Amino acid sequence: MTEQKLDAAAGLAAVLNDGGYVLGDIATKLTCTEANALAEFVAAWITPEFAQEFLAAHAEGDDEGDLHYVGEDGEVHERS
Ligand SMILES: [Zn+2]
């Protein structure tokens, strides 16, 4: 990875980690595939816990049948 790419990724991670507002704002606007990709980035660059919080926020916007839909039992029904 070039230094430019590394700097860009580190800068993005810093912004995303800034209070979590950015991720909270966009969580329900992303598709499940986009959310998973961003969660992987967050887990790698920030913390896995933060990635889980983001996915939980995203799941609130999912409908039944969607990847992260939280059912009546409160469980995340993530399909792989
Ligand atoms: Zn989803």
Image: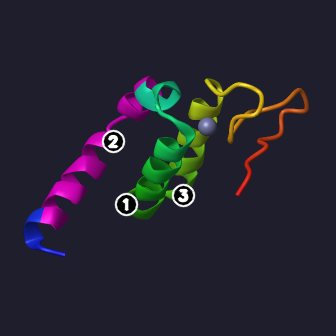
Residue 36 image label = none
Q: Which residue is disc 1 drawn over?
A: 45
Location of the C terminus by quadrant is bottom right
Residue depicted at 47% across the width and 25% down the height? 29
In this rendered view, identify the residue nearer to me: 69 or 52: 69
Q: CA distance from mark 3 to mark 1?
A: 9 Å
Sequence-earlier tag: 1 or 2:
2
Image quadrant where residue 7 sits: bottom left
Q: Secondary structure at mark 1?
A: helix
Q: Is disc 3 in contact with disc 1, using a CB cutoff of under 8 Å?
A: no
Drawn side of residue 27 relative to residue 10, left or right: right
Q: Amino acid at mark 3?
A: Pro
Image quadrant where residue 56 sits: top right
User: Which residue ends up furthest to the left in the rendered image?
Assistant: 4
Q: Amino acid at mark 2?
A: Leu
- Give the percent coordinates (x, y) of residue 60: 65, 25
Q: Which residue is disc 2 drawn over?
A: 16
Q: Splitting the image into four quadrants, where does ligand 1 fall?
A: top right
Drawn side of residue 53 relative to residue 19, left or right: right
Sequence-earlier tag: 3 or 2:
2
In this rendered view, identify the residue nearer to me: 67 or 28: 67
Residue 48 image label = 3
Q: Is residue 77 magenta?
A: no
Crowding at mark 1 (Cα within 10 Å: few <14, some 14-19, many 20+): some
